[in-house]
Image (cartoon, rainbow, N blue to C red):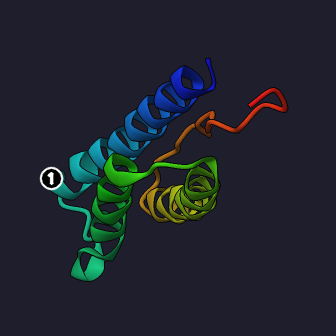
Amino acid sequence: MANFDFLKAKDIAMENLEAIRLSLARCVDEGMIDLEDLLYNEILGLIDDVSVMKTWEEMEELVAKAKIVEQDVAAWLAMHGRTSVSLPWPRQTKSN
């Protein structure tokens, strides 16, 4: 069961990162500038990290980084008059 929970958590993390990436890409396509593609590249790096994660410790580290990127993207969107919604990130339950 713990392995299933971890795989589900990886899927949720991937979905969240894809949602952030798509939101950012859509805004960039509309003419908003992500200087040097910094945010976009950070998101792509985290997406790559999800695919190779094997432990909950790695998941916790990724989620911490992803939350920071999520906040950075939300701030960037706010500068351009857009809003964003906070995403539910996976976390290990005590039974795992």
Q: Residue 66's spot in the image, x, y percent?
A: 53, 57
Q: Nearer the viewer, residue 42 or 94?
A: 94
For image coordinates 43% across by 51% down, the residue present is 53
> In this rendering, is residue 53 above or below 90?
below
Q: Is residue 90 left or right of residue 31?
A: right
Q: Residue furthest right?
A: 94
- Label 1 packing within 10 angstroms: few (<14), some (14-19), many (20+): few
Q: In the rendered picture of this protein, how many numbered marks are placed on residues? A: 1
Rendered residue at 52%/42% (across/down): 84
Could you tell whether 39 is left or right of 33 in the image?
A: right
Q: In the figure, is residue 50 to the left or right of 70? A: left
What x and y, as percent, mark residue 92?
A: 72, 37
Residue at horizontal 69 percent and vertical 38 percent from the top: 91
Say if 95 sits above or below 28 in the image: above
* Residue highlighted by disc 1: 29
- Tell me the quarter of the image containing the C terminus: top right
Q: Quadrant of residue 16?
A: top left
Amino acid on which the number 1 mark rests in the picture? Asp
Q: Which quarter of the image is occupied by the N terminus?
A: top right
